[in-house]
Amino acid sequence: MSTLAAVQGDFQQYLLRGATGVAGHVLGTARVPVATRLGIYGDAYRSRLADALRSNFPALARLLDEDFQLLAGAYVDTHDSPYFSIRYYGDELPQFLAAEEHYAGAPILAELARWEWTMSGVFDAADAQPLTPEALTHVAPEQWAFLRLHWHPSVQRLALNWNVPQTWKALTEDSERPPVEYRAAPTQWLLWRQELTSYFRSLPDTEAAVLDAARGGRTFGELCELLCAEVGATAAPAQAAALLRDWIGAGLITATA
């Protein structure tokens, strides 16, 4: 007699691979044969995954309209759900859109999917108490060069060639979409959350380079050296102070060490 684990395994293989081993465990009737009964569950499983994609990528779904169902079907065919929570289904959709021949010809789709997935991650990130400007008054002058910044868990960075944030905003607000624009030199974007509100803004190349270095663990002294190379020794101190002020004001930094 089959064990429950064996039946569950066969049923899982039917849902994921279409294997027919589970049919031997299912009773059918003349009115509702085995294939029909199993099909109800199989179709429901695929439909639930497609619904999860639509929920996780609402702007992309709105952009593609009826074609999104075709995309969802193609993705479900090739990607199982490895997570306990269906919230995380679709993590490989940007790569799928970039590689799949039918979609790769419109690279803005992959970038839009990357943007939506990143925005969801920003919103779901852990909470942390931002650093206050007053906390920096306790840093001794001789410590500044060795100071390292700790960043809010929600902080994310993207480099995008297409005007995806503007398109995403129009799609989510149901307003007129801007013409599609491509830039050979990608625009740098910063994304983060303060309390329950997500924010994003474009970054000048200099700020992007310094911010990435800071998130990579470089000390404040090393950041100043980087700024000297970017803007010159005369402008670097004021630039460093301005960046630090803006980052703290936006709640990006949670601690120093």
Image (cartoon, grey):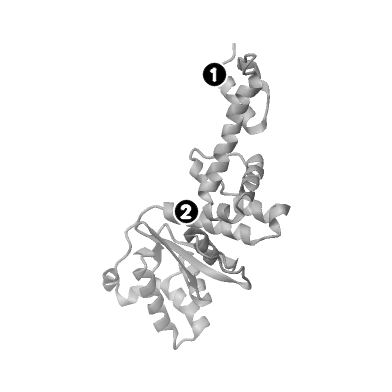
Label 1 – label 2 distance at C-alpha: 37 Å
When the figure is inspected, residue 68 is found, relative to residue 216, above or below; the finding is above
Label 2 neighbour load within 10 Å: few <14, some 14-19, many 20+: some
Q: Which residue is mark 1?
A: 4
Residue at image coords 52%, 52%:
58
The residue closer to the viewer here, 203 or 181, is 181
Q: Position of residue 198 (x, y in %)?
A: 41, 60
- Determine the image quadrant of residue 63: bottom right
Badge 1 vs badge 2, beta-carbon distance below 8 Å: no
Left or right: 52 as drawn, with respect to 182: left
Q: Residue at x 39, y 78 (%)?
A: 242
Residue 86: % across, % down: 50, 41
Q: Position of residue 51 (x, y in %)?
A: 54, 42
Q: Amino acid at mark 1?
A: Leu
- Residue toward you, 239 or 143: 239
Type of the residue with mark 2: Gly
Locate the N terminus and report the quarter of the image it occupies: top right
**Vertical placement of 18 versus 110: above or below?**
above
Provide the residue designation for mark 2: 121
The quadrant of the picture occupied by the C terminus is: bottom left
- Image disc number at residue 173: none
SS state under label 2: helix
Number of residues whose C-alpha sits closer than 10 Å to that of mark 1, classed few (under 14), some (14–19) or many (20 or more)? few
